[in-house]
Amino acid sequence: MKKSFLLSVFLAVAVCVIAQAPRREIRKNLRLSASNLLAYPGPRQHTLTPPPEGMRPFYISHYGRHGSRYHTRPSIYNAPYYVLTDADKAGQLTPLGRDVMQRLDRIRRDAYRQWGELTDLGAEQHRQIITRMYERFPEVFADSAAIVAYSTPVIRCVLSMENAMLRLLQLAPGIQLKHDASQQNASTLNYQDRGLMALRMDSTAKSAYTAYMQKTLRADRLMRSLFRDQQWVSEKVNVSQFCEDLFRVASILQNSDIATKETLYDIYTDDEIYRNWKISNVWWYLSYASTPVNGHLQPYTQRRLLNNIINDADAAISRQGTGANLRYGHETALLPLCCLLDINGCGLSTTKLTRLDKMGWVNYRIFPMGGNLQFVFYRRSPSDTDVMFKVLLNENEATLPLKSSMAPYYRWADFKEYCKRILDEYPNLRKQKK
């Protein structure tokens, strides 16, 4: 009885610690609050679990998001700047407000005509990722290994791929490399399902997000620090939109050299930074995860990508040699794919948006700049049909909701059956939403 009680206490404490993890993590590293704009942090796990006895890696199936970039549109930089310049003309800025306006001007000038482009940091991220992949699994990149790399035609993705491939050729000059970037690739690597996109932020999801945002945002202190007259603010400024735009600029800075010269995090309290992140976390969850709010459907935007991963892997298994399929795309594919497969619990389904982070759905752990999935395949010999694999999310071993006595290793046959069940559910879910 005493042991049972102590176990219950221990579990309760553990749950409490896990629930508070995002707040603690963000307070320790403010950059985590950037959500999808987080510069790739690199792997936390430096020693991987040894494979089952006698098994060796022979194939890697990879999906990687492009590396660090600038914001994709000038309007993202300009919107908060113009709000402040209008206020300045009206004599409504505090000294801090004028200082922030001047910072924003320098920031937007630094990004001028580089909108959406890969930064030097983004290129280096992919050189490092492929280097670690090679060092961890050198057998996969043996001489004559068949390496196929392809990306969407978006320049930041193409350059992410090219930086990785140039580095890989330095490390493994004997590989047989084929690489390509085309619009045709985009239909698989970043499929935009118009039907599902129309349901993404339907009236129910939009109402849920708006209610959560209004309840969570605390902007009064920040507005008072930037603007002189709060009555003028209430009449002239869309406060929630201004706060969103300003925080997005604050978040992107870590992805380029300007981070050594400029910051905006200093204008916020720790609690305000955490609340801004929570709002973003809920937006990404409602937009791409398996939420019942809009019918559990959004992860299915990546059903083509999942089929592509399965088919390419089956073809690689049937061959005698080693190799890899290396795909370069976007967070709008990486995130829903992780949710579709329920990697590390990303498939969480809940309507309790206020508890989302406490339930472990934390966006910055899934899809930072340069975020990636690696499916690493093992077998004992080319004739071995009992193929096993493991999944690395951002180069850390990840879990799947599959039974395995050797986790993080899983049987490929079990995974394919699991995926078939997932994909078979789609027509019914789609029908229910109509």
Image (cartoon, rainbow, N blue to C red):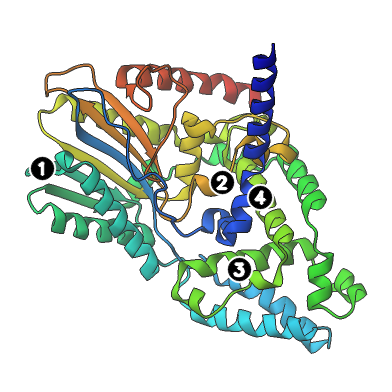
Residue holding disc 3 = 250
Specify the label residue 142 is tagged with: 1
Q: Is residue 52 left or right of residue 219?
A: left
Q: Is residue 400 left or right of residue 272?
A: left
Mark 2: secondary structure: helix
The disc labelled 2 sits on which kind of residue? Answer: Asn
The disc labelled 3 sits on which kind of residue? Answer: Ala
Residue holding disc 2 = 363
Specify the label residue 197 is tagged with: none
Circle nearer the N terminus (3, 1) = 1
Measuring 73% from the left and 79% from the top, which residue is drawn there?
Answer: 84
| Circle 4 or circle 1, nearest the eye | 4
Residue 237: tell me if it is visible. Answer: no
Tag 1: Cα neighbours inside 10 Å, few (<14), some, or many (≥20)? some
| Real-space CA distance between mark 2 and mark 1, rounded to the nearest whole angstrom | 35 Å
- Tell me if residue 67 comes above or below residue 56 in the rendering: below
Residue 233: tell me if it is visible. Answer: yes
- Location of residue 270 in the rendering, given as x and y in whole percent from the top left corner: 70, 61
| Real-space CA distance between mark 4 and mark 1, rounded to the nearest whole angstrom | 44 Å
The C terminus: image quadrant: top right
The disc labelled 1 sits on which kind of residue? Answer: Ala
Q: Residue at the far right: name it.
A: 231
Residue holding disc 4 = 23
